[in-house]
Each structure stands twice: as C-alpha cells, then as structure tokens.
Amino acid sequence: MSRALETVRHAATRALYRYVGHRRCFGTFERGNFKVVDEKDVSYFKQLLGAGSVVYQNAFDLEAYNRDWLGKYRGNSSLVLKPKSTDEVSHVLSYCHEHSIALAPQGGNTGLVGGSVPVFDEVVLSMSRMNSIHAFDEISGVVECDAGCVLEDIDQFLLQKGYTVPLDLGAKGSCQIGGNVATNAGGLRFLRYGSLHGSVLGLEVVLPSGEVLDQNTSVRKDNTGYDLKQLFIGSEGTLGVITKVALMCPQEPKSIHLCYLACPTFSLVTEVLKLAKKELGEILAAFEYLDQESVDIAVDTLSLRNPLGINDERMYYIVLETRGSHHDHDAEKVEQFLELCMSKGVVSDGTIAQDATQSKAIWELRESVTEALRVKGATYKYDVSVPIYQMDDVVQETRERLRNQPDCLVVGYGHVADNNLHLNISVPKYSDAIRDMLEPWIYAKVTSLGGSISAEHGIGQMKSAALAQTKPKNALHLMRDLKKTIDPKGIMNPYKIFTTL
C-alpha cells in the first residue's frame, strides 16, 4: 500500500472512530496518531503466536473484547491477540512499539470504568491464556502465578493449602489477578488485609518497548532504592503489561462469623462501626452497608430473600464478618457485641448466620446488587471515597437532584469502613441528559468533601476528564512525565487515565 493511500485511510478511520467513540462512550477523545492494523501486521502476529491465538475481523468473536460487561463502553478493535508466555508478550509489544500500534491490555474485562476495552481500534491483548500457577511457599504464604489466572481459581488452589487470597470481589469467578493488580482492586476484604500495594510482593512487567522488567521477588522486605513495582499497581495498563505476580496470602481463618443487621438511620450504622472496631478489634474482617433501595432491587429483580424479612420501615443494612483462629472465643465476642448493640439501641434487628448456606445467602444479597442493576437497565456507577459520616448525604443529595426524572432509581451501598461508597443510578437507558445532571457535579461534590473520585475501580476512560479537574496540577504533570518516560509513543492503553498527553 502506498504511503499516500495509507495516509488517506488513516485519516478516514480516525474521523470515523472519533464519531463512533464519542457517540458510544460519551467521550471527548480524539484518535491518536497510531497505525491502522493491516494484513501485514496480522500475518506477523499469526506467525509469532499461531493462528489460533489471533482473532481478526470476526465481528462475533470480537464482540466480547470490544464491549464492557455493562454495555456502556464499546470499542472498534479488529484484532485480538492471545499470547501464552512473557516472551510472546515481549515480541508483541516490541513490534507494536516499532510500528506505533496502540494496545489495550485486557484481563477478565470485569472493570466498570471502561479501562479494559478499546476506545477506538486499539489491538486487544488478552491475557487469558497466561493462567498457570508456578509456585507456592507454604511457610511464607506467597503464591507466584501468571497474570491471566482467575482470582477464584487462585483462591481454590490456596484453600487446599490452608491459605486464601487477600482480596474478594463480586467478579472473582471471571476477573484475573493481573487486572486486579493493574487496577489496584479493593473489594470485601480490604478492611482486614489492606491494599494490593501491600500484598503484592513482586511483579514481572513487559514495558512498551518489549523489554521485560523483572521485579518478581517473593521476599517481603526489599529496601534497595525505588520500589518500581508500585508504579504498575493501579496503572491500568498504561505503563506496561503485567505478566506475573507474587502475592502474599493469609492463612485461611479457622473461625468465620457473619452478621446481618438493620439500623433505622445511617448515623446509627456509623455508631455500629465504632462499636465493632472497639469490641471486635483484631477479628473484624468486613463491614459493608446497603440502603433499603439496594436490598429491594436485589430482592425484587433476582428473587433473593432479605434475611430479616419484609420490614415496613426504611432500613440500612450491615453485613459484618469476623475472621479469627478460635471459634468459641470469636463466637463469644460476636454475641457480646450484638447484645451491646441491642442494649444501646443502635441496631433494631439482626441475625447471625448459622451455617455456610446462610452465610452464602447473605453475601449473595450484598454481591448481587450490581447484577440486579444491570438486569434492570442502564446504570451510572460512581465508585467514590468520602468521609464515612457523609456517605449517605451524597446519596440523598443525588436523589434530590434526580427526583423529577422518571424511572430513575438511586441506590447506595459499599465498603463503609473503607470510606468507599458505591453510588448507582439506574435508568432505562443511557442518555446525555442524565449524565450531564450527574457529571461533573458528583466529582465536584466528592472533591469538596476531601474525597476521591475513584476509590477502587480506577479512572479508565470514564473519569479521565474528571481526573484532570480534581487532581493537583503538579501531581498530574508528574504522572504525565512518568507516562512519557516509560511509554514515549503512548501505545499502552491510550485514552485511559489521561484524555491527552
């Protein structure tokens, strides 16, 4: 193909994707000056990876990679690559770097901010075939595995060894550990085990040039200069491709107790949290809340059951879990804690799961809210951090803001002990009108409270414009400088985190 014809084709593609991308993603992105993949490129990748590891111009097979699971974001990639080794990833990135081909790394594609799908025609790099567990140290509890390992598969492997993963997510059956690390996923066990910044001991990363950066140590202490792996935790695939992970895992608890409680007001939820921290201390593992609307939509849409039955009054519900090593000791502490809550009048009703079946039903109710919202229709999802005592205020202000919108349901739930509110707005379909009522208002509101516009889901393409308005300018400049230094051609997951460089 002549250079002139290639230039014309590139310009036409760029204009088309600018329109389609804006229309589908409500974005304001302009396609970067990246090469449009052609038959010569595809031929190289087939020779490198094998024809079975390349999906090209097959609309049906490409659909799952181009669209996020909520149906909110859709890209236009014509090519998916499925490497099976770090060496193959290295060769792919080296070629793409040389030819200025943009890439979108993708794990389980369970993200909620459009970070794992292409915006335009970026080549999707699926990590699903890199799914081996390489080693486990039964003394230190460190597991070393490929980035494409599904989180639940790792957990099942560890449970056989008497250990468990330090994070638990609703999407654990399909999300991959590389994606978890790349987004610094939080989840239900954050209160007990903390951030992946602490649990991840080592990483192997392929840089945009194709160079392999081996930081995959399994020791807990390594104080030898800059801790480079931390740059890639939460980087959302914009600095390189995570290929291997060394993860420090806790032992499986011998004693787990789960409570489901009801409070008439959100302020009483905060009182219960204070009591739980004081009375349960070291065994407190999770403290989640759901407002009445969250519980109702899960019960009504998915035919689930509220463990406390139907209540005529509006309630806030708490899912509280303890994890310890001595069943009788923990059971006594939990019972005394509940008695104290009842005597102080901070809890109006509650139950303790008596077996695994009841525990599973309670957690299913909590984890099914997102699925219930998806089934109901389109959802605007805002994962934010705010001071705990103001979490419900944000929900109520959002309801007031949208009160005249028909068929609009606002629900609030989340990891209350972590300051993490999941604010969800359910509507029949996505529209510019509803979005403009929510954005940038919600981001300005959260920032004014001293919070964060992203607690655990990342920035992706959804919040890149908001990040530019809420992050300190010098911090943004430093982030951009790091991006330009590590990825000078900007081929790694473009349009994510930054609208432009």
Image (spheres, helix red, strand yellow):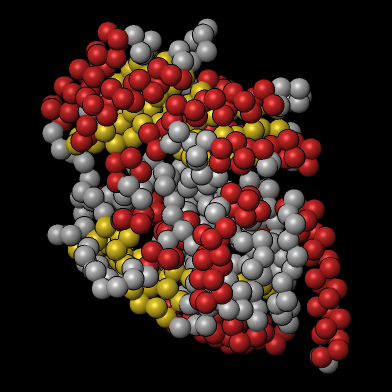
Q: In the image, what residue occupies the spot 53% across and 33% down?
A: 369
Q: Is residue 277 left or right of residue 435?
A: left
Furthest residue to the front?
474
Quadrant location of the C terminus in the rendered image? bottom right
**Residue 409 makes an appearance in the image:** yes
Q: In the image, what residue occupies the spot 46% across and 58% down?
A: 234
Q: In the image, what residue occupies the spot 21% across and 41% down?
A: 253
Residue 31 % position (x, y)? 74, 68
Quadrant location of the N terminus in the rendered image? bottom right
Whether residue 448 is situated above or below residue 269 in the rendered picture:
below
Of 371 and 248, nearer the camera is 248
Whether residue 101 is situated above or below residue 246 in the rendered picture:
below
- Count the numbered circles shown: 0
- Quadrant hosting residue 286: top left
Of 413 and 28, nearer the camera is 28
Q: Is residue 258 left or right of residue 64?
A: left
Residue 380 % position (x, y)? 65, 39
Residue 495 % position (x, y)? 65, 63
Q: In the image, what residue occupies the spot 50% across and 29% down?
A: 391
Q: Is residue 475 left or right of residue 75?
A: left
Q: Is residue 239 left or right of residue 24?
A: left
**Residue 358 makes an appearance in the image:** no
Residue 436 % position (x, y)? 75, 40
